[in-house]
Amino acid sequence: MKIFRHPRGLASAFAFAAALGAGPALAADLTVAMQLEPPHLDPTSAAAGAIDQVVYSNVFEGLTRFMGDGSIVPGLAESWDISEDGKTYTFHLHDGVKFHDGTTMDAEDVKFSLDRARAADSANAQKALFADIAEVEAVDPLTVKVTLAEPNGSFLFNMAWGDAVIVAPESIEDIKQHPVGTGAFAFKEWVQGDKIVLDKNPDYWGTPAKLDEVTFKFISDPTAAFAAMMAEDVDVFSAFPAPENLPMFEADPRFQVLVGSTEGETILAMNNKRAPFDNKLVREAVAHAIDRKALIDGAMFGYGTPIGTHFAPHNPAYVDLTAESSFDPALSKKLLAEAGLPDGFTTTLHLPPPSYARRGGEIVAAQLAAVGIKAQIVNVEWAQWLETVFKGKDFGLTIISHTEPMDIGIYARPDYYFGYDNPAFQELMKTLAATTDPAKRTELLQQAQKIIADDYVNGYLFQLPALTVAKAGVQGLWANAPTQAIDLTAVSWAE
Protein backbone atom coordinates (compact mmCIF):
# COMPACT_ATOMS: atom_id res chain seq x y z
CA MET A 1 0.00 0.00 0.00
CA LYS A 2 1.16 3.49 -0.80
CA ILE A 3 -0.23 6.52 0.98
CA PHE A 4 0.96 9.80 -0.46
CA ARG A 5 0.75 13.01 1.49
CA HIS A 6 2.85 15.92 0.30
CA PRO A 7 2.78 19.58 1.42
CA ARG A 8 1.63 22.05 -1.16
CA GLY A 9 2.06 25.52 0.30
CA LEU A 10 0.50 27.86 2.81
CA ALA A 11 -2.99 28.09 1.30
CA SER A 12 -3.45 24.35 1.42
CA ALA A 13 -2.10 24.23 4.95
CA PHE A 14 -4.72 26.76 6.06
CA ALA A 15 -7.41 24.77 4.25
CA PHE A 16 -6.22 21.62 5.99
CA ALA A 17 -6.29 23.28 9.40
CA ALA A 18 -9.77 24.60 8.72
CA ALA A 19 -10.95 21.17 7.71
CA LEU A 20 -9.61 19.69 10.92
CA GLY A 21 -11.31 22.41 12.90
CA ALA A 22 -14.62 21.48 11.34
CA GLY A 23 -14.08 17.78 12.07
CA PRO A 24 -16.35 17.22 15.09
CA ALA A 25 -19.48 18.36 13.23
CA LEU A 26 -18.87 15.75 10.55
CA ALA A 27 -17.28 13.03 12.63
CA ALA A 28 -20.31 10.74 12.55
CA ASP A 29 -20.99 10.97 8.79
CA LEU A 30 -19.13 10.01 5.64
CA THR A 31 -19.86 10.66 1.97
CA VAL A 32 -18.32 8.20 -0.47
CA ALA A 33 -18.38 8.78 -4.22
CA MET A 34 -18.36 6.00 -6.80
CA GLN A 35 -18.62 6.09 -10.56
CA LEU A 36 -21.44 3.62 -11.24
CA GLU A 37 -24.91 3.51 -9.71
CA PRO A 38 -26.16 -0.01 -8.93
CA PRO A 39 -29.08 -1.26 -11.08
CA HIS A 40 -30.65 -2.51 -7.82
CA LEU A 41 -29.46 -3.65 -4.38
CA ASP A 42 -29.79 -7.45 -4.40
CA PRO A 43 -26.25 -8.89 -4.66
CA THR A 44 -27.67 -12.39 -5.08
CA SER A 45 -29.36 -11.75 -8.43
CA ALA A 46 -27.10 -9.60 -10.62
CA ALA A 47 -23.55 -9.37 -11.94
CA ALA A 48 -23.15 -5.62 -11.31
CA GLY A 49 -20.14 -4.97 -9.09
CA ALA A 50 -21.63 -1.64 -8.00
CA ILE A 51 -24.17 -3.55 -5.90
CA ASP A 52 -21.49 -5.21 -3.77
CA GLN A 53 -19.60 -1.93 -3.51
CA VAL A 54 -22.52 -0.52 -1.54
CA VAL A 55 -23.93 -3.49 0.36
CA TYR A 56 -21.09 -6.03 0.89
CA SER A 57 -20.43 -6.33 4.63
CA ASN A 58 -22.11 -2.95 5.19
CA VAL A 59 -25.68 -4.23 4.74
CA PHE A 60 -25.42 -7.94 3.91
CA GLU A 61 -23.20 -10.63 5.42
CA GLY A 62 -22.38 -14.22 4.57
CA LEU A 63 -21.26 -17.26 6.53
CA THR A 64 -17.67 -16.17 5.84
CA ARG A 65 -16.26 -12.88 4.59
CA PHE A 66 -13.25 -11.28 2.95
CA MET A 67 -10.99 -8.96 4.86
CA GLY A 68 -9.01 -6.13 3.29
CA ASP A 69 -5.89 -8.30 2.98
CA GLY A 70 -7.82 -10.98 1.07
CA SER A 71 -8.03 -13.42 3.97
CA ILE A 72 -11.22 -15.40 4.68
CA VAL A 73 -12.58 -15.06 8.22
CA PRO A 74 -15.79 -16.11 10.00
CA GLY A 75 -18.87 -14.02 9.26
CA LEU A 76 -22.32 -15.02 10.45
CA ALA A 77 -20.82 -18.43 11.19
CA GLU A 78 -18.62 -18.15 14.26
CA SER A 79 -17.04 -21.53 13.51
CA TRP A 80 -17.44 -24.68 11.43
CA ASP A 81 -16.52 -28.35 11.35
CA ILE A 82 -15.46 -30.21 8.21
CA SER A 83 -15.96 -33.96 7.89
CA GLU A 84 -13.00 -36.21 7.15
CA ASP A 85 -14.16 -36.81 3.58
CA GLY A 86 -14.42 -33.04 2.99
CA LYS A 87 -18.06 -33.26 1.94
CA THR A 88 -19.90 -32.02 5.03
CA TYR A 89 -19.55 -28.54 6.54
CA THR A 90 -21.34 -27.93 9.83
CA PHE A 91 -21.65 -24.19 10.48
CA HIS A 92 -22.24 -22.84 13.99
CA LEU A 93 -24.00 -19.48 13.76
CA HIS A 94 -23.58 -16.49 16.03
CA ASP A 95 -26.37 -16.20 18.57
CA GLY A 96 -28.50 -13.06 18.78
CA VAL A 97 -28.14 -11.95 15.15
CA LYS A 98 -31.11 -9.96 13.86
CA PHE A 99 -32.06 -8.64 10.46
CA HIS A 100 -32.61 -4.90 10.15
CA ASP A 101 -36.39 -5.45 10.34
CA GLY A 102 -35.99 -6.96 13.82
CA THR A 103 -36.52 -10.60 12.84
CA THR A 104 -34.03 -13.21 14.01
CA MET A 105 -31.43 -14.63 11.62
CA ASP A 106 -31.20 -18.37 12.09
CA ALA A 107 -30.38 -21.63 10.34
CA GLU A 108 -33.63 -21.57 8.34
CA ASP A 109 -32.54 -18.27 6.74
CA VAL A 110 -29.18 -19.80 5.77
CA LYS A 111 -30.97 -22.79 4.25
CA PHE A 112 -33.36 -20.49 2.38
CA SER A 113 -30.48 -18.36 1.02
CA LEU A 114 -28.33 -21.26 -0.18
CA ASP A 115 -31.28 -23.19 -1.62
CA ARG A 116 -32.49 -20.07 -3.42
CA ALA A 117 -29.03 -19.43 -4.89
CA ARG A 118 -28.69 -22.97 -6.24
CA ALA A 119 -32.28 -23.46 -7.41
CA ALA A 120 -33.01 -24.32 -11.03
CA ASP A 121 -34.64 -20.92 -11.55
CA SER A 122 -31.96 -19.00 -9.62
CA ALA A 123 -31.02 -15.59 -10.98
CA ASN A 124 -27.72 -15.65 -9.08
CA ALA A 125 -24.93 -14.40 -11.37
CA GLN A 126 -22.47 -16.81 -9.72
CA LYS A 127 -24.71 -19.86 -9.50
CA ALA A 128 -21.67 -22.08 -10.11
CA LEU A 129 -20.46 -21.23 -6.59
CA PHE A 130 -23.25 -23.41 -5.24
CA ALA A 131 -23.16 -26.21 -7.81
CA ASP A 132 -21.50 -28.71 -5.47
CA ILE A 133 -24.12 -28.35 -2.74
CA ALA A 134 -26.23 -31.52 -2.51
CA GLU A 135 -28.25 -30.64 0.59
CA VAL A 136 -28.64 -27.89 3.18
CA GLU A 137 -30.11 -28.89 6.54
CA ALA A 138 -31.12 -26.64 9.44
CA VAL A 139 -30.10 -28.92 12.32
CA ASP A 140 -31.25 -26.45 14.97
CA PRO A 141 -31.64 -22.64 15.03
CA LEU A 142 -27.88 -22.07 15.30
CA THR A 143 -26.53 -25.03 13.32
CA VAL A 144 -26.52 -25.58 9.57
CA LYS A 145 -25.19 -28.70 7.84
CA VAL A 146 -24.17 -28.31 4.21
CA THR A 147 -23.47 -31.53 2.34
CA LEU A 148 -21.50 -31.38 -0.91
CA ALA A 149 -21.69 -33.87 -3.74
CA GLU A 150 -17.90 -33.75 -4.00
CA PRO A 151 -15.19 -32.17 -1.83
CA ASN A 152 -14.57 -28.54 -2.75
CA GLY A 153 -11.35 -26.90 -1.61
CA SER A 154 -12.81 -23.47 -2.40
CA PHE A 155 -16.09 -23.81 -0.51
CA LEU A 156 -15.32 -21.43 2.38
CA PHE A 157 -13.88 -18.99 -0.18
CA ASN A 158 -17.06 -19.28 -2.25
CA MET A 159 -19.23 -18.55 0.77
CA ALA A 160 -17.43 -15.21 1.26
CA TRP A 161 -18.65 -13.81 -2.09
CA GLY A 162 -21.33 -11.17 -2.14
CA ASP A 163 -23.46 -13.58 -4.16
CA ALA A 164 -23.58 -15.86 -1.10
CA VAL A 165 -24.86 -13.42 1.54
CA ILE A 166 -27.69 -14.48 3.82
CA VAL A 167 -31.13 -13.02 3.14
CA ALA A 168 -34.53 -13.58 4.72
CA PRO A 169 -37.63 -14.93 2.94
CA GLU A 170 -39.76 -12.25 4.65
CA SER A 171 -37.92 -9.41 2.88
CA ILE A 172 -37.07 -11.04 -0.43
CA GLU A 173 -39.93 -9.46 -2.40
CA ASP A 174 -38.58 -5.92 -1.94
CA ILE A 175 -34.87 -6.74 -1.65
CA LYS A 176 -33.87 -4.95 -4.87
CA GLN A 177 -35.19 -1.58 -3.70
CA HIS A 178 -35.20 -2.01 0.07
CA PRO A 179 -32.48 -4.44 1.15
CA VAL A 180 -32.78 -5.96 4.62
CA GLY A 181 -29.60 -7.59 5.89
CA THR A 182 -27.74 -8.22 9.15
CA GLY A 183 -24.83 -5.81 8.65
CA ALA A 184 -23.45 -2.92 10.67
CA PHE A 185 -25.43 -0.47 8.51
CA ALA A 186 -29.09 -0.50 7.53
CA PHE A 187 -30.60 0.84 4.31
CA LYS A 188 -32.24 4.27 4.75
CA GLU A 189 -33.01 5.72 1.31
CA TRP A 190 -32.14 5.66 -2.37
CA VAL A 191 -32.53 8.78 -4.46
CA GLN A 192 -32.24 7.39 -7.98
CA GLY A 193 -29.46 9.02 -9.97
CA ASP A 194 -28.03 10.72 -6.91
CA LYS A 195 -27.32 8.78 -3.74
CA ILE A 196 -27.90 5.85 -1.41
CA VAL A 197 -27.92 6.49 2.35
CA LEU A 198 -27.21 3.92 5.07
CA ASP A 199 -27.67 4.40 8.81
CA LYS A 200 -25.73 2.76 11.62
CA ASN A 201 -27.45 -0.40 12.85
CA PRO A 202 -27.91 0.17 16.62
CA ASP A 203 -28.65 -3.52 17.20
CA TYR A 204 -25.69 -4.95 15.30
CA TRP A 205 -24.57 -8.32 16.67
CA GLY A 206 -20.83 -7.68 16.17
CA THR A 207 -18.47 -4.72 16.57
CA PRO A 208 -20.59 -1.60 15.99
CA ALA A 209 -19.84 0.75 13.12
CA LYS A 210 -17.96 3.92 14.06
CA LEU A 211 -19.95 6.07 11.64
CA ASP A 212 -23.58 7.05 12.20
CA GLU A 213 -24.46 7.60 8.57
CA VAL A 214 -22.83 6.94 5.21
CA THR A 215 -23.89 8.32 1.85
CA PHE A 216 -22.88 6.84 -1.49
CA LYS A 217 -22.88 9.50 -4.23
CA PHE A 218 -22.78 8.62 -7.93
CA ILE A 219 -20.44 10.71 -10.08
CA SER A 220 -19.76 9.14 -13.46
CA ASP A 221 -17.78 11.90 -15.19
CA PRO A 222 -14.03 11.97 -14.40
CA THR A 223 -13.90 15.78 -14.58
CA ALA A 224 -16.82 16.07 -12.17
CA ALA A 225 -15.13 13.51 -9.90
CA PHE A 226 -12.01 15.68 -9.68
CA ALA A 227 -14.05 18.82 -9.04
CA ALA A 228 -16.18 17.21 -6.31
CA MET A 229 -13.15 15.88 -4.48
CA MET A 230 -11.19 19.12 -4.72
CA ALA A 231 -14.20 21.08 -3.46
CA GLU A 232 -14.46 18.59 -0.56
CA ASP A 233 -18.07 17.86 -1.47
CA VAL A 234 -17.26 14.18 -0.87
CA ASP A 235 -14.99 12.61 1.72
CA VAL A 236 -13.83 9.55 -0.23
CA PHE A 237 -13.80 8.62 -3.89
CA SER A 238 -13.44 4.89 -4.44
CA ALA A 239 -12.00 3.68 -7.77
CA PHE A 240 -11.15 7.28 -8.66
CA PRO A 241 -11.76 7.55 -12.42
CA ALA A 242 -9.21 10.26 -13.31
CA PRO A 243 -5.73 8.87 -12.53
CA GLU A 244 -4.10 11.80 -14.33
CA ASN A 245 -5.24 14.00 -11.42
CA LEU A 246 -3.73 11.89 -8.63
CA PRO A 247 -0.48 13.93 -8.45
CA MET A 248 -2.54 17.01 -7.50
CA PHE A 249 -4.13 15.15 -4.60
CA GLU A 250 -0.77 13.69 -3.58
CA ALA A 251 0.57 17.24 -3.33
CA ASP A 252 -2.33 18.51 -1.22
CA PRO A 253 -2.22 17.85 2.56
CA ARG A 254 -6.02 17.88 2.70
CA PHE A 255 -6.02 14.48 1.02
CA GLN A 256 -4.53 11.01 1.04
CA VAL A 257 -4.15 8.77 -2.00
CA LEU A 258 -4.26 5.01 -1.58
CA VAL A 259 -2.85 2.94 -4.42
CA GLY A 260 -3.53 -0.76 -4.07
CA SER A 261 -4.46 -3.80 -6.12
CA THR A 262 -7.80 -5.29 -7.09
CA GLU A 263 -9.05 -8.63 -8.33
CA GLY A 264 -10.02 -6.87 -11.56
CA GLU A 265 -8.65 -8.53 -14.68
CA THR A 266 -9.34 -5.95 -17.38
CA ILE A 267 -9.90 -7.78 -20.64
CA LEU A 268 -10.81 -7.22 -24.25
CA ALA A 269 -13.50 -9.89 -24.27
CA MET A 270 -14.23 -11.64 -27.56
CA ASN A 271 -17.44 -13.40 -28.52
CA ASN A 272 -16.00 -16.89 -29.08
CA LYS A 273 -19.27 -18.13 -30.57
CA ARG A 274 -19.57 -15.40 -33.19
CA ALA A 275 -17.56 -15.27 -36.41
CA PRO A 276 -14.80 -14.42 -36.90
CA PHE A 277 -13.88 -14.78 -33.19
CA ASP A 278 -14.81 -18.46 -33.31
CA ASN A 279 -11.48 -18.81 -35.14
CA LYS A 280 -8.50 -19.05 -32.80
CA LEU A 281 -6.23 -17.43 -35.41
CA VAL A 282 -8.41 -14.32 -35.34
CA ARG A 283 -8.39 -14.16 -31.55
CA GLU A 284 -4.61 -14.52 -31.58
CA ALA A 285 -4.39 -11.73 -34.16
CA VAL A 286 -6.44 -9.46 -31.92
CA ALA A 287 -4.20 -10.24 -28.94
CA HIS A 288 -1.00 -9.39 -30.83
CA ALA A 289 -2.49 -6.11 -32.07
CA ILE A 290 -2.69 -4.69 -28.54
CA ASP A 291 0.14 -2.61 -27.08
CA ARG A 292 -0.49 -2.98 -23.35
CA LYS A 293 2.08 -0.36 -22.33
CA ALA A 294 0.54 2.26 -24.60
CA LEU A 295 -2.90 1.32 -23.26
CA ILE A 296 -1.88 1.53 -19.60
CA ASP A 297 0.00 4.79 -20.15
CA GLY A 298 -2.75 6.35 -22.23
CA ALA A 299 -5.88 5.24 -20.40
CA MET A 300 -4.56 4.69 -16.86
CA PHE A 301 -1.61 7.15 -16.78
CA GLY A 302 0.77 4.36 -15.85
CA TYR A 303 -1.37 2.71 -13.17
CA GLY A 304 -2.04 -0.98 -13.84
CA THR A 305 -0.08 -4.21 -14.24
CA PRO A 306 0.04 -5.97 -17.65
CA ILE A 307 -1.50 -9.46 -17.65
CA GLY A 308 -1.35 -12.31 -20.15
CA THR A 309 -4.12 -14.47 -18.71
CA HIS A 310 -7.16 -14.17 -16.45
CA PHE A 311 -5.41 -14.20 -13.10
CA ALA A 312 -4.26 -11.57 -10.60
CA PRO A 313 -0.49 -10.93 -10.56
CA HIS A 314 -0.48 -10.62 -6.76
CA ASN A 315 -1.76 -14.19 -6.38
CA PRO A 316 1.05 -16.61 -5.46
CA ALA A 317 -0.10 -19.00 -8.21
CA TYR A 318 0.17 -16.37 -10.97
CA VAL A 319 2.17 -17.18 -14.09
CA ASP A 320 3.41 -14.30 -16.27
CA LEU A 321 2.21 -15.21 -19.77
CA THR A 322 2.29 -11.74 -21.30
CA ALA A 323 4.96 -12.85 -23.80
CA GLU A 324 2.45 -15.20 -25.45
CA SER A 325 0.41 -12.21 -26.59
CA SER A 326 3.17 -9.65 -27.06
CA PHE A 327 2.56 -6.57 -29.20
CA ASP A 328 3.39 -7.65 -32.76
CA PRO A 329 1.30 -5.95 -35.50
CA ALA A 330 3.15 -7.78 -38.28
CA LEU A 331 2.29 -11.15 -36.74
CA SER A 332 -1.26 -9.96 -36.25
CA LYS A 333 -1.64 -9.19 -39.96
CA LYS A 334 -0.05 -12.54 -40.86
CA LEU A 335 -2.52 -14.41 -38.65
CA LEU A 336 -5.46 -12.57 -40.18
CA ALA A 337 -4.26 -13.58 -43.64
CA GLU A 338 -3.97 -17.20 -42.51
CA ALA A 339 -7.54 -16.96 -41.23
CA GLY A 340 -8.71 -15.87 -44.67
CA LEU A 341 -9.10 -12.22 -43.68
CA PRO A 342 -6.14 -10.44 -45.33
CA ASP A 343 -8.09 -7.18 -45.47
CA GLY A 344 -9.26 -7.44 -41.88
CA PHE A 345 -12.91 -7.20 -40.82
CA THR A 346 -15.45 -4.99 -39.08
CA THR A 347 -16.89 -5.65 -35.64
CA THR A 348 -18.40 -3.85 -32.66
CA LEU A 349 -16.65 -2.73 -29.47
CA HIS A 350 -19.12 -2.22 -26.63
CA LEU A 351 -17.81 0.11 -23.90
CA PRO A 352 -19.51 0.48 -20.50
CA PRO A 353 -19.14 3.76 -18.54
CA PRO A 354 -15.96 3.21 -16.46
CA SER A 355 -13.08 5.37 -17.68
CA TYR A 356 -10.78 2.37 -18.10
CA ALA A 357 -13.25 1.10 -20.72
CA ARG A 358 -14.16 4.36 -22.43
CA ARG A 359 -10.62 5.74 -22.52
CA GLY A 360 -9.07 2.34 -23.13
CA GLY A 361 -11.56 1.60 -25.88
CA GLU A 362 -10.44 4.55 -27.98
CA ILE A 363 -6.83 3.37 -27.78
CA VAL A 364 -7.68 -0.28 -28.47
CA ALA A 365 -9.83 0.67 -31.46
CA ALA A 366 -6.91 2.62 -32.96
CA GLN A 367 -4.51 -0.28 -32.38
CA LEU A 368 -6.90 -2.74 -34.01
CA ALA A 369 -7.43 -0.41 -36.95
CA ALA A 370 -3.68 -0.43 -37.56
CA VAL A 371 -3.88 -4.14 -38.47
CA GLY A 372 -7.12 -3.87 -40.45
CA ILE A 373 -9.70 -4.61 -37.75
CA LYS A 374 -12.34 -1.88 -37.74
CA ALA A 375 -13.96 -1.82 -34.32
CA GLN A 376 -17.07 0.33 -34.25
CA ILE A 377 -17.34 1.81 -30.76
CA VAL A 378 -20.73 1.45 -29.06
CA ASN A 379 -20.88 3.36 -25.76
CA VAL A 380 -23.46 1.79 -23.44
CA GLU A 381 -24.69 2.45 -19.94
CA TRP A 382 -24.17 -0.26 -17.34
CA ALA A 383 -27.73 -1.60 -17.56
CA GLN A 384 -27.41 -1.78 -21.35
CA TRP A 385 -24.10 -3.64 -21.08
CA LEU A 386 -25.67 -6.22 -18.76
CA GLU A 387 -28.65 -6.68 -21.04
CA THR A 388 -26.91 -6.60 -24.44
CA VAL A 389 -23.47 -8.09 -23.76
CA PHE A 390 -23.62 -10.12 -20.55
CA LYS A 391 -27.12 -11.57 -20.95
CA GLY A 392 -27.83 -11.14 -24.65
CA LYS A 393 -24.33 -12.02 -25.90
CA ASP A 394 -24.96 -9.58 -28.76
CA PHE A 395 -21.47 -8.17 -29.28
CA GLY A 396 -18.18 -8.71 -31.04
CA LEU A 397 -15.72 -7.14 -28.58
CA THR A 398 -16.08 -5.42 -25.24
CA ILE A 399 -13.75 -4.06 -22.56
CA ILE A 400 -14.61 -4.97 -19.00
CA SER A 401 -12.82 -5.52 -15.70
CA HIS A 402 -13.78 -8.77 -13.95
CA THR A 403 -13.47 -7.76 -10.30
CA GLU A 404 -14.70 -10.98 -8.72
CA PRO A 405 -12.02 -12.74 -6.64
CA MET A 406 -10.03 -15.50 -8.36
CA ASP A 407 -12.71 -16.13 -10.97
CA ILE A 408 -10.83 -18.14 -13.60
CA GLY A 409 -13.61 -20.71 -13.18
CA ILE A 410 -15.88 -18.63 -15.43
CA TYR A 411 -13.97 -20.12 -18.38
CA ALA A 412 -15.53 -23.48 -17.51
CA ARG A 413 -19.01 -22.13 -18.26
CA PRO A 414 -19.87 -22.56 -21.96
CA ASP A 415 -22.93 -20.33 -21.59
CA TYR A 416 -20.91 -17.46 -20.08
CA TYR A 417 -21.07 -14.29 -22.15
CA PHE A 418 -17.82 -14.77 -24.10
CA GLY A 419 -18.84 -18.33 -25.01
CA TYR A 420 -15.64 -20.34 -24.40
CA ASP A 421 -16.34 -24.08 -24.53
CA ASN A 422 -13.37 -26.32 -23.76
CA PRO A 423 -14.21 -29.72 -22.16
CA ALA A 424 -10.59 -30.23 -21.07
CA PHE A 425 -10.63 -26.93 -19.18
CA GLN A 426 -13.99 -27.82 -17.63
CA GLU A 427 -12.55 -31.13 -16.35
CA LEU A 428 -9.53 -29.29 -14.96
CA MET A 429 -11.82 -26.99 -12.97
CA LYS A 430 -13.70 -30.01 -11.59
CA THR A 431 -10.39 -31.50 -10.48
CA LEU A 432 -9.41 -28.19 -8.88
CA ALA A 433 -12.67 -28.01 -6.95
CA ALA A 434 -12.08 -31.49 -5.52
CA THR A 435 -8.46 -30.75 -4.58
CA THR A 436 -7.49 -29.47 -1.14
CA ASP A 437 -3.70 -29.84 -1.22
CA PRO A 438 -2.28 -26.29 -1.66
CA ALA A 439 0.66 -27.34 -3.86
CA LYS A 440 -1.57 -29.37 -6.16
CA ARG A 441 -4.09 -26.54 -6.37
CA THR A 442 -1.32 -24.15 -7.39
CA GLU A 443 -0.21 -26.56 -10.12
CA LEU A 444 -3.78 -26.87 -11.44
CA LEU A 445 -4.33 -23.11 -11.40
CA GLN A 446 -1.15 -22.59 -13.37
CA GLN A 447 -2.28 -25.17 -15.94
CA ALA A 448 -5.60 -23.34 -16.22
CA GLN A 449 -3.90 -20.01 -16.84
CA LYS A 450 -1.80 -21.54 -19.62
CA ILE A 451 -4.78 -23.17 -21.35
CA ILE A 452 -6.79 -19.98 -21.74
CA ALA A 453 -3.69 -18.01 -22.73
CA ASP A 454 -2.85 -20.60 -25.40
CA ASP A 455 -6.43 -20.49 -26.69
CA TYR A 456 -6.41 -16.67 -26.80
CA VAL A 457 -9.92 -16.73 -25.39
CA ASN A 458 -9.81 -12.99 -24.73
CA GLY A 459 -7.34 -10.15 -25.02
CA TYR A 460 -5.74 -9.83 -21.58
CA LEU A 461 -4.92 -6.18 -20.88
CA PHE A 462 -4.05 -5.22 -17.31
CA GLN A 463 -4.90 -5.73 -13.66
CA LEU A 464 -7.06 -2.84 -12.52
CA PRO A 465 -5.44 -0.84 -9.72
CA ALA A 466 -7.36 0.26 -6.62
CA LEU A 467 -7.14 4.04 -6.65
CA THR A 468 -8.78 5.80 -3.73
CA VAL A 469 -8.71 9.50 -2.87
CA ALA A 470 -9.87 10.48 0.62
CA LYS A 471 -9.70 13.36 3.02
CA ALA A 472 -6.66 13.11 5.26
CA GLY A 473 -8.69 12.43 8.39
CA VAL A 474 -10.43 9.30 7.12
CA GLN A 475 -8.99 6.06 8.51
CA GLY A 476 -9.79 2.36 8.18
CA LEU A 477 -10.34 2.26 4.40
CA TRP A 478 -9.27 -0.80 2.43
CA ALA A 479 -6.22 0.01 0.31
CA ASN A 480 -6.65 -3.16 -1.76
CA ALA A 481 -9.88 -4.57 -3.15
CA PRO A 482 -9.93 -8.36 -2.60
CA THR A 483 -13.58 -8.27 -3.61
CA GLN A 484 -15.99 -5.70 -5.02
CA ALA A 485 -16.63 -3.80 -1.82
CA ILE A 486 -16.34 -0.44 -0.12
CA ASP A 487 -16.31 -1.87 3.38
CA LEU A 488 -17.04 0.96 5.81
CA THR A 489 -17.61 -1.15 8.91
CA ALA A 490 -14.27 -0.16 10.48
CA VAL A 491 -13.93 3.33 8.96
CA SER A 492 -13.79 6.41 11.17
CA TRP A 493 -12.49 9.96 11.36
CA ALA A 494 -9.19 10.58 13.11
CA GLU A 495 -9.63 12.43 16.37
Image (cartoon, rainbow, N blue to C red):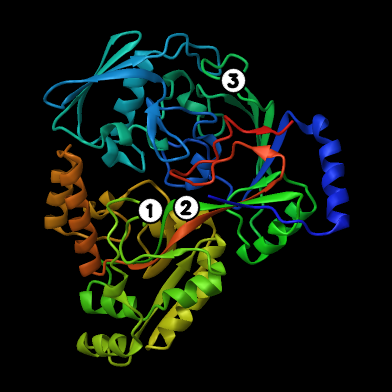
> Residue 151's spot in the image, x, y percent?
15, 32
| Residue 377 is at least partly visible in this image | no
Image quadrant assignment for residue 249: bottom right
Residue at position x 72%, y 40% in the image = 473
Residue that appears at 36% across and 39% down:
123
Is mark 2 in CB contact (under 8 Å) with mark 1? yes
- Classify mark 1: helix, strand or loop: loop
First along the sequence among labels 3 and 1: 3
495, above or below 409, in the image? above
Badge 3 crowding class, 10 Å Cα cut-off, few under 14, some 14 to 19, many 20 or more, is some
The residue beneath circle 2 is 261
Asked if marks 2 and 3 touch (Cβ < 8 Å), the reply is no
Q: Name the residue under label 3.
A: 208
Going by the numbered disc 1, the residue's amino acid type is His
Q: Residue at x 80, y 34 (%)?
A: 23
Coordinates of residue 223 in the picture (x, y in percent): 70, 63
Tell which of 473 and 191 is nearer to you.
473
Q: Please indicate whether residue 328 sits to the left or right of residue 300 in the image.
A: left
Quadrant of the image occupied by residue 290: bottom left
